[in-house]
């Protein structure tokens, strides 16, 4: 519908330039504009490959059962409310990017001024703007399906526009799709970016990329102060639920308490208590719960003490996966015979009223 309105506006503008009532000229112009519109929609489908990164290749199979495809613009954020996906922002991240793709909007969140002690949350919305998605919609599942993935991602680098083909506008932020949860779900593909465009305000259509998140150049440039490489969360959701901040804070505090209990039980050297925090469905990228349990019992048997520190904690509700939460943190580990510092990601779910870890990876 948005594309049609833009097209009609262009045709009317051309009509004003036609002398008299030359209906044949108007119809010809309209036909030409229709052809042009279809060409514009495919203009970046075969981009020149940019240097040092995969080209933007991939918007979905049909929406999973019970989930709707985007239908068009809706009401934006509600004053005084907060997205239920953003529970806690890490101290190292200056902000967060929250995409509501049913609304074709990107919401920008920055760290709240410390002087505002009235809020239970550390982030505040500082703006929102239009974003275009993949030509085939959402729920990316495979390479080349021209759909946009849902999930929580992190920017891996910045590529300036002068190192890219013109279709990417003033620059690009490649994302880490497929992440570890995508791989667990057997999703494939690559080259999902946030980037600018060579199109003007009218010709950037809501569904026009090969899976990327495309912004007008002036909107892309506003991201510089909010994006910290590998730290700023990029939350890509089909729809964002705006809820009371107290509800977000309660969920954050409940999960944070479970994380602290996991940490303390790990330090206790009581391996049974430690493993009680893991789901029967638990996996790492290479182990299931049985192998993980055997590994931890063998390792802990050789320790006289363990100390675990958690810093820079981030907590998010995972889009498209009801009840799934992503936790990120810097983990410091010290034992009687080993030391390490890692950035860790854990996926938690409530099972029979108890928080448990269903997936864990670190680097």
Image: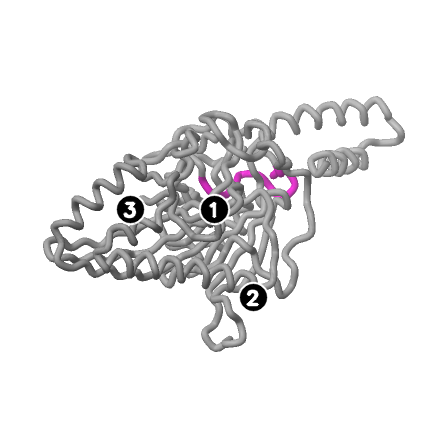
Question: Quadrant of the rendered structure where residue 95 is?
Answer: bottom left
Q: Secondary structure at mark 3?
A: strand
The x and y percentages for residue 317 are 49, 51
Front-most of residues 35 and 226: 226
The x and y percentages for residue 132 are 58, 40
| Rendered residue at 55%/27% (across/down) | 61
Residue 162 within the segment the image draws in magenta? no
Q: In front of the other: label 3 or label 1?
A: 1
- Please rate how many residues cluster around mark 1, counting C-alpha atoms within 10 Å: few if below 14, some from 14 to 19, many from 20: some
Q: Secondary structure at mark 1?
A: loop
Helix, strand or loop: magenta stretch = loop
Front-most of residues 26 and 78: 78
The x and y percentages for residue 112 are 48, 68
| Rendered residue at 45%/46% (across/down) | 152
Q: Secondary structure at mark 2?
A: helix
The magenta span reads 193-206
Residue 164 seen in the current view? no
| Rendered residue at 56%/64% (across/down) | 245
| Residue marked by disc 1 | 324
| Rendered residue at 60%/41% (across/down) | 200
> Earlier along the polypeptide chain: callout 1 or callout 2?
2
Front-most of residues 63 and 273: 273
The x and y percentages for residue 189 are 42, 29
Q: In front of the other: label 2 or label 3?
A: 2
Q: Quadrant of the N terminus?
A: top right
| Residue marked by disc 2 | 246
| Residue marked by disc 3 | 362
> Earlier along the polypeptide chain: callout 3 or callout 1?
1
In the drawing, does residue 67 fall left or right of residue 271?
right
What is the CA distance from the residue labelled 1 to the residue labelled 2?
A: 20 Å
In the drawing, does residue 193 fall left or right of residue 299?
right
């Amino acid at each position: 519908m948005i594309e049609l309105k833009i097209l009609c506006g262009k045709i009317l503008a051309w009509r004003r330039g036609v002398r008299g009532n030359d209906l044949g000229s108007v119809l010809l112009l309209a036909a030409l504009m229709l052809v042009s519109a279809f060409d514009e929609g495919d203009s970046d489908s075969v981009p020149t490959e940019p240097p040092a990164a995969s080209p933007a290749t991939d918007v979905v199979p049909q929406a999973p059962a019970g989930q709707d495809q985007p239908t068009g613009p809706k009401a934006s954020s509600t004053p005084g409310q907060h997205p239920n996906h953003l529970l806690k922002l890490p101290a190292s991240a200056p902000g967060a990017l929250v995409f509501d793709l049913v609304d074709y909007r990107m919401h920008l969140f920055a760290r709240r001024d410390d002087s505002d002690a009235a809020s239970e949350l550390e982030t505040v919305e500082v703006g929102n703007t239009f974003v275009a998605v993949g030509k085939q919609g959402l729920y990316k599942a495979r390479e080349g399906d021209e759909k946009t993935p849902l999930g929580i991602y992190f920017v891996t680098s910045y590529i300036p526009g002068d190192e890219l083909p013109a279709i990417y506008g003033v620059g690009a932020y490649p994302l880490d799709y497929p992440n570890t949860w995508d791989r667990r779900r057997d999703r494939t593909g690559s080259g999902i970016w946030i980037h600018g465009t060579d199109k003007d305000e009218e010709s950037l259509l809501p569904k026009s990329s090969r899976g990327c998140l495309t912004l007008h150049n002036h909107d892309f440039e506003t991201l510089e102060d909010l994006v910290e490489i590998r730290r700023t969360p990029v939350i890509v959701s089909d729809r964002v639920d705006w809820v009371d901040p107290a509800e977000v804070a309660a969920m954050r505090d409940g999960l944070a308490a479970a994380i602290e209990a996991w940490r303390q039980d790990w330090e206790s050297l009581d391996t049974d208590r430690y493993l009680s925090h893991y789901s029967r469905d638990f996996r790492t990228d290479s182990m299931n719960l049985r192998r993980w349990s055997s590994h931890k019992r063998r390792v802990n048997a050789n320790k006289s003490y363990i100390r675990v520190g958690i810093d820079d904690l981030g907590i998010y509700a995972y889009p498209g996966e009801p009840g799934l939460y992503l936790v990120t943190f810097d983990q410091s580990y010290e034992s009687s015979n080993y030391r390490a510092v890692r950035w860790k990601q854990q996926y938690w779910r409530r099972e029979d009223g108890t928080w448990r870890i269903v997936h864990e990876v670190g680097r």
